[in-house]
Amino acid sequence: MESPLVQPHATPAAPTHRPAPPVQPPRSLTRAAGRAIGDYAMIRPGDRLLLGLSGGKDSLSLLHVLLALRHKAPVPFALAAATVDPCIDGYDPVYLKRYVAGLGLPFFYERQTIAARALDTMRGDSFCAYCARMRRGILYATARREGYNVLVLAQHLDDLAESFLMRAFHNGNLATMQAHYVVDAGDLRVIRPFLYVRERQTAEFARRAGLPVVQDNCPACFRVPTQRLHVKQLLAREESGHKRLFANLLAAMRPLLGNIPE
């Protein structure tokens, strides 16, 4: 659902100096993302992609992977980034304006008081779920306003596996995040190119490349243990004795990842 919080006339931070050479991601990341893009027909000729950029290791890694793919991909596409600042103490992504501009990309910065509004409007939901839903609505609205038809999200295989188990454990159903889908309004597609990427790969790339990562890009989520953290720890324990755990989970989740949209 589109958020009512979006400012209707936000302007992009235009590049103000000569773009810096982008960081080159490892082939393991670009190959994995390229395979997911091909398997699910995520990018089509003339697509205009808007990346949701939190400043975390995953979205910053995906930013550089998309830059690398755009340079060599046979399918032409446009790329921009958007950051939603929910006004949470301890999270300040404003530095991303200069960073993205330095890469020569359009950038849209949406500062919304999600945390404060949650106190008044959140009903029977966790703050994390509420914030994610509101951020998604703001990104949808930004894409529509600025003429982008594809929203790119940086969830990876670990995220999908955690969601799969959480829904099975707590909701009693089999579901996870979809790889590629059309929103209910029918005017935007959402893609997750890091479908086959492990979290440790983005962490290693971010560390080696010195990416300007906000280590705690949602402080409110990490002040107390969460269900997701418990599931993450469970998966880590299981993987220590079963090296093919995530490959098996991916195979189990494939029927749930959705069909390729028309």
Image: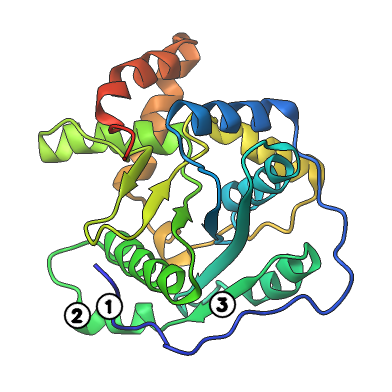
- Can residue 156 be seen here? The reply is yes
Asked if the residue under mark 2 is in contact with the one under mark 1, i.e. CB atoms within 8 Å, the reply is yes
Disc 2, SS: helix
Q: Residue beneath label 1, please? A: 118
Indicate whether 19 appears above or below 183.
below
Q: How far apart are marks 3 and 2 (CA)?
A: 23 Å
Distance of label 1 from label 2 (alpha carbons): 5 Å
Instruction: Name the quadrant of the N terminus.
Output: bottom left
Marks 1 and 3, the one that precedes in the sequence: 3
* Residue assigned mark 3: 109
In the displayed structure, does residue 81 sit left or right of residue 121?
right
Q: What scheme was used to colour the molecule?
A: rainbow
Residue at 59 percent across and 55 percent down: it is: 56
Farthest residue, direction front = 45
Nearer mark to the viewer, of 1 and 3:
3
Percent across and percent down for residue 19 are 85, 65
Name the kind of residue labelled 2 in the image.
Thr
Q: Residue 121 carries which label?
A: 2
Residue for point 40% across, 60% down: 221
Amino acid type for the residue under numbered disc 1: Ala
Give, as a three-letter code, the residue at label 3. Answer: Tyr
Residue depicted at 59% across the width and 31% down the height: 34
| Mark 1 nearby-residue class (10 Å; few <14, some 14–19, many ≥20) | some
Q: Which of marks 3 and 2 is nearer the N terminus?
A: 3
